[in-house]
Amino acid sequence: MNNTPPGEETFLQTSIDAITRILQRKMFSESKDEIALILFGTPDTDNPLADGECYENITIAQPMDVASFELIGPSCQFNAGSKRGSWSDLGGEFGDDQIDTVVAGIKNSGTELNVIGPSIEEDDDDEDAPGPSTANGHTKDKTPQQRAGEAMLKHILQEVDGECYSFSEALPALSYFQTRQIRQTAWKCQLEITSNLKIPVCSYVKVG
């Protein structure tokens, strides 16, 4: 998470910026969406799926709740640790033995999956050829582990009709706050067709 050329922003800081902007948008629009903050590669383990062998070094920093200042605070106050588990550049090790269960869970719960991270390239003719990896403004060759992670992520997104956005695509869009949705107020009146035929209606103002 902290590996980056001099002068470039780290994956960690870019991720924190994205998280903060998403939470700010949710708060500004008074969204009722619930958000959880889950950290990978933490020194300790705190999640209900951990059994001593699987899901280690994963911590639920904040359980599901609506966006608030209390949620923004912890999301901006953590540092990269030494434990493996970071998948920010798709370079971390992963297991795919339960991938079908994960995909089924996303589908059955009606979850919409949007991934913000490194850019994902379209399929090329030679899957084994190392291609460039672009993130935070710099380009480097992908490792075999990154290509495997990218293939797995693309498989999941394809199965659940999800979308993937690079940091360079998402951060500018997240810079603009979403306005609060205000329910229109109708006024009641009578639609008079004849003196003996009157229909009660509700009227709204529409601006084209």
Image (cartoon, rainbow, N blue to C red):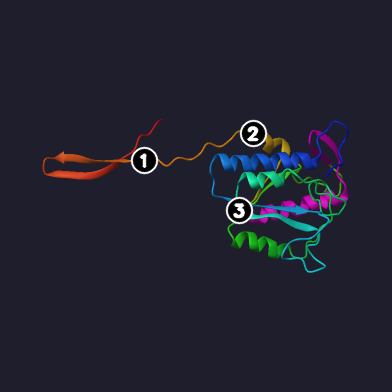
Residues at marks 3 and 1 touching, judged by CB atoms closer than 8 Å: no
Going 78% across and 69% down the picture, which residue do you hit? 51
Query: Which element carries disc 3, helix, strand or loop?
Result: strand
13 or 206: which is nearer to us? 13
Q: Position of residue 178 (x, y in %)?
A: 56, 37
Asked where in the image residue 167 lies, by quadrant, the reply is top right
Q: Which residue is identified by label 2?
A: 175
Query: Which element carries disc 1, helix, strand or loop?
Result: loop
Q: Is residue 116 left or right of residue 83?
A: left
Q: Amino acid at mark 1?
A: Thr
Magenta-tinted stretch: 132-161
Q: Position of residue 145 (x, y in %)?
A: 86, 51
Q: Please tell me which of labels 2 and 3 falls first in the chain.
A: 3
Q: Looking at the figure, which quarter contains the N terminus?
A: top right
Query: Which element carries disc 2, helix, strand or loop?
Result: loop
Magenta-span inclusion, residue 77: no
